Image (tube, grey):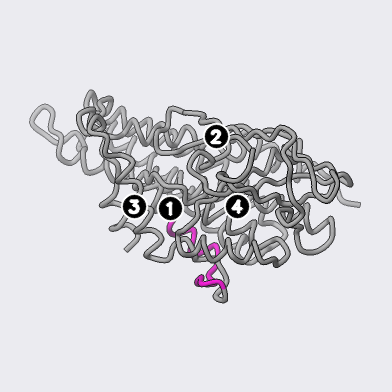
Amino acid sequence: MARDVLAAARPRWSAGERATGTEEPARARLWGRVAELGWLGLEVPEEHGGAAATFGETAVVLEEMGRALTACPFVGTAVLGAAVLGAVEPAAGRDDLLRAVGAGECVLAVATGEATTGPAFRLEAAGDGYRLRGRAAFVLDAPEADCLLLVATEPDASPVVVAVSRRASAVAVEDQPVLDVTRRFGMVVAEDVEVAGPEVWRFAGDAGDAAAAVARLGDRGALAVALDSLGVAEAMVETTVAYAGERRQFGRPIGSFQAVKHACADMLVATTTSRELCALAVEDMVAGTPDASASVSRAKSHAGAAAVEVAGKAMQLHGGFGYTWESGIHAALKRAALNRSLFGSVRSHRQRLAARLTTSTP
């Protein structure tokens, strides 16, 4: 079902169709359909109107969104936003936001900061409230978010979540366009912004639990992008194999030529490996195993690199048509290239895996 719904809403890429100005209404219609089907509330608790499902169900949607090059703020809202709300201590504002997310009434964006440097925002006590300072670049889905969830540090360095409304807060969001037109990013800037106590939510548990929760957010984002890359690669394999069976040269389908067969086989092997690694990472993520982070890094590093390779070969095997706007392959290649860098590059995830291998235990 997810494949059919998203395929019907797949963006069209001819210059004439892009010039009609119908992109925003189509995006709004798709978002309404996603909310209607309950995908936004998959991991929202039942008492707040959700399905109380696991990341395993969310993973199915993510893969299909990659396959269809879906343009909507699903990752910021349902993958990262819902996870943040589920990790903080219960509060009236948090519960209301969970219900709004499940109903499709609120778009979220989450700024977690970098894994190596920590949260990009900091809180300072100021009277009965706080002052918020900091900036985070390329925050996914920030330009269209109704509410921003900013991971910040308190004066004692404990991580907390600051919930700020785009309409009522002085926090600024500057649009940051990228080559991939299916995703939106923004620079989030807080310059001495007043924050009330009820807008600061603490993670459940102690400081160690809070740090682990922030790390899990990064892993969720990385795995979400890996699944998206898997979907992109699967679509490129299917599209290329179908084209190779139809396109004829020298009186025969180009798929009958050995060089084309080998290239398609390489694409399939790379995609199949990505699928197995992603499946293992999803299983570990749902189970909360100690090796979940390593599984995520394996999936993200391989799927991120493989999708770029597969999309590049798809463009080559489509010949001159593969380089046109009408083919749509350029959009898949741009999305795959961006995915390769989101939530940790291929190199950074491989370095994380290498560090595990070289760290000795007493």
Question: How far from the left and from the top, in percent, is residue 137?
Answer: 61, 32
**Residue, far left:** 251
What separation in Å lies between label 4 and label 3 (alpha carbons)? 23 Å
| Residue 167 appears in view | yes
Q: Is residue 6 magenta?
A: no
Identify the amino acid type marked 3: Leu
Q: Which residue is mark 1?
A: 63
Q: Label 4 belongs to which residue?
A: 220
Badge 2 or badge 4: first in the primary sequence: 2
Residue sitting nearer the eye, 339 or 85: 85
Q: Nearer the viewer, residue 184 or 224?
A: 184
**CA neighbours of label 4 inside 10 A, class few (<14), some (14 to 19), many (20+):** many
- Which residue is painted at 54% across and 52% down in the image? 277
Residue name at image x 57 percent, y 71 percent: 45
Earlier in the chain: of badge 4 and badge 3, it is 3
Q: Position of residue 59 (x, y in %)?
A: 49, 58
The image quarter containing residue 209 is bottom right
Of tags 2 and 4, the one toward the viewer is 2
